Image (cartoon, coloured by chain):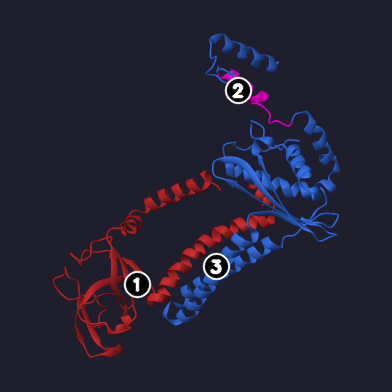
Amino acid sequence: MASQEKITVYNLADLKNTTDDAIPNYLSSLKFTPSHTPTDVRLALGFSAFALSAACFFWDYKLGFESTKTYTAFAVALYTILNGFLTFWILFVEKGTIYQGTSPKGDKIRISTETKKNVPVYYMTIEVKDGKTGEKKTLKISRSFTEWFDAAGRFVAAPLQTVLAQGVEVIGRVDTKRANAAKTAEGAEPGPPAAVYTPEMLDMLSGAGVSVVGSAAETATGTEAAEAKKGGKRRKA
Amino acid sequence: MLSSLGNPRQAAAQLMNFGLILSTAFMMWKGLSVISDSPSPIVVVLSGSMEPAFQRGDLLLLWNRNLFTETSVGEIVVYNVKDKDIPIVHRIISKFGTGPTAKLLTKGDNNDSDDTKLYTPGQNYLVREDIIGSVVGYMPFVGYVTIMLSEHPWMKTVMLGIMGLVVVLQRE
């Protein structure tokens, strides 16, 4: 289930970007149809502003300043307008949207996400519009990144998919397996996993002769370290 | 990091962000040009010929519009000599006539003689359109970076290296 790529678990931007990329993948696997209109508008605005300034650079380079200054003045004004509109679009229309699309049952969904500095929590805002009744709803879900990243920084898709399928009816309706799995698992134990060491990490630590004990400060005695070393060897064998 | 290359829209967005940084800097410069009506609204002093007013490395802010009064004697101006690309900053010491055809003579405060030797052979005076702006403000020493970079090209390499490293190391 885990993807091959590992990220640094201390890098909040990495955590967010990886999760942001995973959600569209998950939804397209459920046959959701993405709508790229907001992104395309942003790209069109940005690239036309860039093209304008490239043209301005070119005529300035070829013909000098004096003979072209009227055009330059218009170009500067237009560039300011385009860039202002682009900023408006990013701040007030896209608002951190990472996915917008339609489910196979005709419901519309839009997911925007954010993180807060130094807080390892993924804040999702999900707007849905029912395909039949046209009813609009806004959900807010915030979950810790530890739920879908293991200690080594590998992304694990299933828990995130479960969070979405369980929390968002529009997704749960399509992915019934995950939605139901969530309900049964809820009774058992949904708590976050304790400090988990991967086999590789154990190998690395034992190889370096470092104490593997979880809270080393408590009991960092020689015997403990030796035991840990043994543990490492056993795993290797 | 490289996985974004698989998604054309994401790759295009990254390219766009990089392009917009460059183009915004350029357009701000051009905006300043348009407002001050000068092809080069900010210049760096390269010589000590205007000491004690300006030192090497001072950054000068230029204004090239005659809104209320004509450019007149006593003003410090930046001008381009015919067929030479290096702008010179000196003071106007005498003026004959009025309007765009007035004949202007300049001299560096720290020089012994006037600028007739600096002008192109056959050119004995300046006219208004040789001037690219009058100095209206300055920041001491800030422009020294550009002097260092142009006089010691290896610094450019070092600076580009450091900037490249920063881009690679902190990727948002």
Q: Position of residue A129 (x, y in %)?
A: 78, 58
Q: CA distance from mark 1 to mark 3?
A: 36 Å
Whether label 3 touches label 2, CB < 8 Å:
no
User: Which element type, helix, strand or loop, lies under badge 3?
Assistant: helix
Supply the letter of whichever chain is blue: A
Quick one: label 3, few (<14), some, or many (20+) residues within 10 Å?
few
Q: Amino acid at mark 3?
A: Gly
Instruction: Please give the range of residues in magenta.
Output: A190-208
Q: Residue at x 73, y 56 (%)?
A: A100
- Reading the image, the residue beneath label 3 is A84
In space, the residues marked 3 and 2 are separated at their CA atoms by 52 Å
Q: Are marks 1 and 3 on the same chain?
A: no
Q: Amino acid at mark 1?
A: Asp
What residue did someone put label 1 on?
Answer: B85
Q: Is residue A159 magenta?
A: no
Mark 1 and mark 2 in contact (Cβ < 8 Å)? no
Pinpoint residue A209: horizontal percent, then vertical percent: 55, 16
Residue A204, label in figure: 2
Spot occupied by residue B114 in the image (x, y as percentages of width and height)? 17, 76
Q: Specify the subunit that label 3 lies on.
A: A
Left of B107 or right of it: where is B7?
Answer: right
Q: Which colour is chain B painted?
A: red
Image quadrant for the C terminus of chain A? top right
Task: Name, please, the residue furthest toward the top.
Answer: A223
Per the image, label 1 sits on a secondary structure element best described as loop
Q: CA distance from mark 2 to mark 1?
A: 63 Å
Can residue A154 be seen in the rendering of this structure? no
